[in-house]
Image: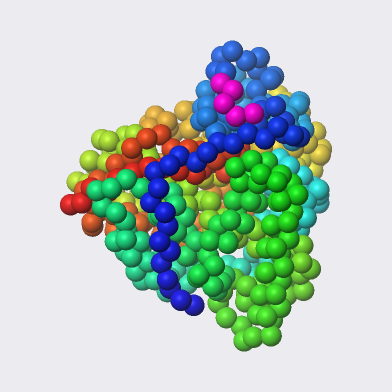
């Protein structure tokens, strides 16, 4: 594979926020001011409202629910009724209880929209035991410690090349030129996918998680189905090809030769591919952008970092906590469960709001709304999940972020954020579509 470097646009133009009327729920109408939580009746709070996320207005809603209604029922939303778990300890309890709370696609999967209505089939994150562990074990070698040792010098070379290509002293978009670029290259390596086509992986990730966003899928669900069908066709050909080749360490070869995964049908293959693409793209990519943004919001922490580079590993965990790149995971109750005096009935949707648990004032010793790069509890965040479904690639994500900041500090005195970022219209992926910065040299 060619290890080429994409020369992304250095544009500072903020993405156009388009508007599309047909068949969109009312909360997708952009620009309507989101009222504060204090003006809402408790039962009407709907954390799945994507406009709340695009405007970054969810924090007071989570704070109110943690204090007044930590197990909260929303009877009516675009995704139907669901429960919200908002405290850190409760999230850990639900996430660790895979016998009473299912992530299986047959029960609806891991997002508030039901997988039973999707063309994406089951993957190991949307499977219960024993299928889950059998498939997860197949993919694990691609991100095992031995693999990370192999990846580390490659990640460093690429990170150096990307940072050295940036226009020092001139404004550019950090999201496209750094965060997307680095994660796309890593994804292509993990899949042994052509590097010159790596942005296809980014596109499929964006489409998967934003089917109702008119800026990403102006054609709505019809476009979503068409693009994911193309993704399925591309990876089905790769999967068949790897079956006929010698086993190797990339994800597609592991899936093609694994006992639990070599006989998947196209929908199940697509399910696993999408899981790995989204997991490898959105989490690391948005923590790369979120870290730059956070250090600019808390300049004292940036100065602390400049004075002591040994804080980088702990800071990476704090970035992932503060950003929380995947806002929630959904489970489905397999039996009636009582929590905080509320009865979650069998078949109910349950959203574990990781983003709320990571800001839970009853759990964190120091103000959880602040970035504190030497926070003692930083590694206790819930961004990677808990229990059997804990993120399989968490160490790789931490490695990429650590190397990025080692190389940033080696060449730049400061990465200055010039304006508030544009945020994606999603209650699942908590991310950025645009972050204007200027890099000041040492």
Q: How many marks?
A: 0
Residue nearest the viewer, comparing 13 with 343 = 13
Magenta highlight: main SS = loop
* Residue 398 seen anywhere in this rendered image of the structure: no
Q: Is residue 30 magenta?
A: yes
Nearest the eye: 120 or 323: 120
Quick one: 130 or 184, which is closer to the camera? 184
Query: Taking 376 as reference, is 321 left or right?
Result: right
Spot occupied by residue 302 in the image (x, y as percentages of width and height): 27, 41
Q: Residue at x 76, y 25 (%)?
A: 75
Does 6 sit left or right of 276 as displayed? left
Colour convention: rainbow
Which residue is painted at 23% across and 40% down in the image? 303
Q: Which quadrant of the view contains residue 193?
A: bottom right
* Residue in the picture at 69% in, 19% down: 43
Q: Is residue 256 above or below residue 299?
A: below
Residue 165 placement: quadrant: bottom left
Q: Residue at x 47, y 52 (%)?
A: 285
Is 169 rendered above or below residue 77? below
Point out residue 300 in the picture as x, y percentages from the top left corner: 25, 35
Residue 254, located in which quarter of the rendered image? bottom right
Report x, y in % for residue 343.
76, 28
Q: Is residue 184 visible?
A: yes
Residue 239: x %, y % from top left: 68, 75
Instruction: Give left or right: position of 104 versus 351.
Output: right
Examine the structure image and report whether residue 361 is included in the region drawn in magenta. Answer: no
Q: Which residues are magenta?
A: 29-33
């Amino acid at each position: 594979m060619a290890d080429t470097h994409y020369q992304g646009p250095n544009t500072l133009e903020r993405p156009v926020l388009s508007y599309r009327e047909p068949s969109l729920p009312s909360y997708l109408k952009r620009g309507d001011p989101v009222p504060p939580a204090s003006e809402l009746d408790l039962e009407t709070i709907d954390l799945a409202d994507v406009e709340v996320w695009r405007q970054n207005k969810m924090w007071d809603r989570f704070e109110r629910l943690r204090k007044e209604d930590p197990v909260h029922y929303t009877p009516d939303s675009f995704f139907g009724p669901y429960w919200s778990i908002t405290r850190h300890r409760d999230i850990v309890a639900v996430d660790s209880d895979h016998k009473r709370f299912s992530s299986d696609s047959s029960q609806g999967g891991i997002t508030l929209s039901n997988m039973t209505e999707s063309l994406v089939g089951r993957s190991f994150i949307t499977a219960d035991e024993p299928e889950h562990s059998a498939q997860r074990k197949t993919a694990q070698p691609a991100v095992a410690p031995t693999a990370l040792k192999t990846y580390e010098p490659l990640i460093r070379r690429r990170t150096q090349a990307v940072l050295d290509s940036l226009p020092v002293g001139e404004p550019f978009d950090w999201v496209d030129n750094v965060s997307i670029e680095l994660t796309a290259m890593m994804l292509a390596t993990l899949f042994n996918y052509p590097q010159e086509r790596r942005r296809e992986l980014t596109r499929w990730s964006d489409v998967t998680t934003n089917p109702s966003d008119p800026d990403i899928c102006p054609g709505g669900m019809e476009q979503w189905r068409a693009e994911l069908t193309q993704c399925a066709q591309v990876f089905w050909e790769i999967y068949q090809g790897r079956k006929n080749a010698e086993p190797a360490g990339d994800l597609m070869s592991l899936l093609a030769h694994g006992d639990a995964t070599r006989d998947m049908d196209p929908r199940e293959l697509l399910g696993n591919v999408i899981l790995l693409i989204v997991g490898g793209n959105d989490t690391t990519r948005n923590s790369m952008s979120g870290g730059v943004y956070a250090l600019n919001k808390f300049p004292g922490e940036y100065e602390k970092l400049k004075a002591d580079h040994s804080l980088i590993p702990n800071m990476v965990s704090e970035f992932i906590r503060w950003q929380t790149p995947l806002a929630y995971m959904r489970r489905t109750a397999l039996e009636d469960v009582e929590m905080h005096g509320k009865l979650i009935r069998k078949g109910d949707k349950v959203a574990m709001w990781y983003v709320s648990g990571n800001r839970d004032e009853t759990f964190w010793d120091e103000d959880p709304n602040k970035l504190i790069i030497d926070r003692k509890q930083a590694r206790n965040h819930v961004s990677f999940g808990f229990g059997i479904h804990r993120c399989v690639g968490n160490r790789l994500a931490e490695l990429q972020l650590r190397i990025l900041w080692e190389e940033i500090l080696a060449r730049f005195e400061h990465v200055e954020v010039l304006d508030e970022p544009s945020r994606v219209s999603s209650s699942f992926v908590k991310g950025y579509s645009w972050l204007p910065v200027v890099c000041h040299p040492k």
